[in-house]
Image (spheres, grey):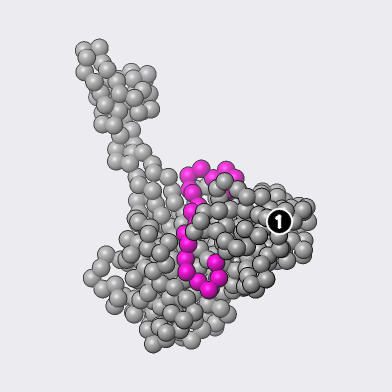
Amino acid sequence: MELHILGTASARPASQRQVSGSLLACEDGVAVIDAGEGFQTRYADHRKRLKTQSPPVSLRAAKIGAVCLTHGHLDHTWGLLPWLQTMALDRREKPLLIIGPTSSDTLEALCAGEPIPPEAPPAELARQMQSWHSLGATSEGLGYKVRWILGDVVADKWVEINPETGASTSLDAMPQPEGWKQVKIVPVATTHTVPSCAWMFESKEKSGKFNRLKAAELRLSKEQQTELGQGRDLTLDDGEVLHAASFRGESIRPRRFVISGDTAEQAPGLTALEGVDVLVHEATFLEDTKDHATEHLHSTATGAVRTALACDASHLVLTHFSARIKDGNISLSEANKAGEGLPLNISLASDGDRVHLHANGHVTHRSWSQNGWTA
Ligand SMILES: [Zn+2]
Ligand SMILES: [Zn+2]
């Protein structure tokens, strides 16, 4: 799984950083996580650079199966509508799933066919989805199928909005993108001023390699090898039992790539996770403004470290920096100090970076500069 980070600023663009937006590429396809202002321009620029790599890296929009929104603040959503319309101009055909968090009150109102409660905040995603629909973002208007899903992440309740009729249907479970088999998208509740969640991309556990050499040494027939290969124990003519498990190498445990949006540190949903390989966590503030973090339900760089340790993460990527932070290395050094001596690698995200989680758990963070990517 590889994450392409297109924006690392909080709230508004800063000199070297644009607002949130990233893409996660995996064997099943690509998912977009947040799409702030200017998303499609940055995505197009990033794709051009990827094409110049040898071998070229493809991140085509036709591979994108889902847009996972972390919350409704505009620095995470304002770029979505124009990009959906560009894909219509490009004659997209593939269906698209758009998922985001909502409150239990709004979800209940939608299910009952009632209007969004007036006390729901302006950034409520249900409001934004309705306004996008009125601006033409429907399957009919765009020419490709879009499913609009909202969920109360804590209660695990989901609803699908039909823009053509305005009606909502409750769902048994959060849908996955069409055709995805190896990687599952899992929402994880976070703590922010509006309903919010992180998105975990979890690969399936893979069984170890079949030991052909051992089978050949025992002069097993093709049929016998197939039996063992499919996990069935085998009894030989002399009564000896060959256990299928002894012909398999060690299985590869699921890999977990977690991308959070805006959140206070140690959000209970995140700290309840185990075995996280990569956690991408906001670090909006530095220690000297930690009161701001508490007040606005954001995190500091050291708060991101505390969260990473609580969910047993191997690698932490810091992102979403306040425009007041002129040098990201200060955030990194505060984080490194907090994580000193602990089994946690920490890196700093800049716009254009790529973070690769390999099947064996190894993580490579490639930083973008005008000369290309360096690990
Ligand atoms: Zn934000
Ligand atoms: Zn926010």
Q: Quadrant of residue 252?
A: top left
Residue 53 location (% of width, % of height)? 51, 60
Q: Is residue 286 above or below residue 69?
A: below
Which image quadrant: the C terminus?
Answer: bottom left
Q: Is residue 94 visible?
A: yes
Residue 195 location (% of width, % of height)? 55, 67
Q: Nearer the viewer, residue 347 or 296?
A: 296
Which residue is the site of mark 1?
113
Residue occupying the point 37% across, 63% down: 271
Residue occupying the point 30% across, 23% down: 233
Label 1's element? loop
Write down the region rendered in magenta: 175-195
Q: For residue 188: magenta?
A: yes
Q: Is residue 325 left or right of residue 113?
A: left
Q: Is residue 214 left or right of residue 102?
A: left
Q: Which SS does the magenta portion mostly show? A: loop
Q: Quadrant of residue 123?
A: bottom right
Amino acid type at circle 1 is Gly
Residue 55 location (% of width, % of height)? 50, 55
